[in-house]
Image: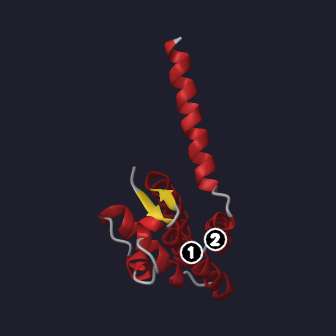
Amino acid sequence: MKTIPKPLVMVNQWSIVTSVVIALLTQSAWILLIPLIANLSSLLIGFHPILVIAKRFLKKPGSEYIQEDYDQLRFNQWLAVGFLVVASISFFLKWSNLFNIATVMVGLAAFVAILGFCIGCFFRFQYQQWKYRRNNSATH
């Protein structure tokens, strides 16, 4: 099973939260492009520039930290990228309400994850349970 050290996951979450706070305070989406491009790059080509830099600051080898599930993190990244794309596009279209809603949602999800509850994990688990129940009921 592929995993990622928790400190690197936290750096990514803090980069989202920080950019969201700045975007909301300035009412500008430009700062959201940093986590958007970093996470999209990670999803599409496997290169996350923020984590490459952050990895240099780990005091121990990555394997010595608590690990997070890679597949779950990719699912969460797709959710974050989706909200960041909606926020960015709505900003450029001057749809301020949608910009604020999408920005707050991605920021809140990242902040709640920092506090220890993963909203994306909850939704993925519910989806997996639904698929399991659907497949089992079809075979019986």
Quarter holding the C terminus is: top right
Q: Is residue 34 above or below residue 124?
A: below
Question: Residue 32, can we see it?
Answer: yes
Residue lying furthest top in this view? Answer: 140
Q: Which mark is residue 107?
A: 2
User: What amino acid is at disc 2?
Assistant: Gly
Q: Residue at x 58, y 34 (%)?
A: 129
72 or 92: nearer the eye?
72
Q: Which residue is mark 1?
A: 16
Residue 94 percent location from the top left of the image: 59, 77
Q: Residue at x 61, y 47 (%)?
A: 123
Question: Residue 93, can we see it?
Answer: no
| Spatial separation of the CA atoms under disc 1 and disc 2 | 6 Å
- Decide which of tag 1 and tag 2 comes sooner along the chain: 1
Residue 27 percent location from the top left of the image: 64, 84
Is 12 left or right of 49, judged from the image as shown? right
* Circles 1, 2 touching at the beta carbon (< 8 Å): yes
Q: Residue at x 51, y 16 (%)?
A: 138
User: What amino acid is at disc 1?
Assistant: Ile
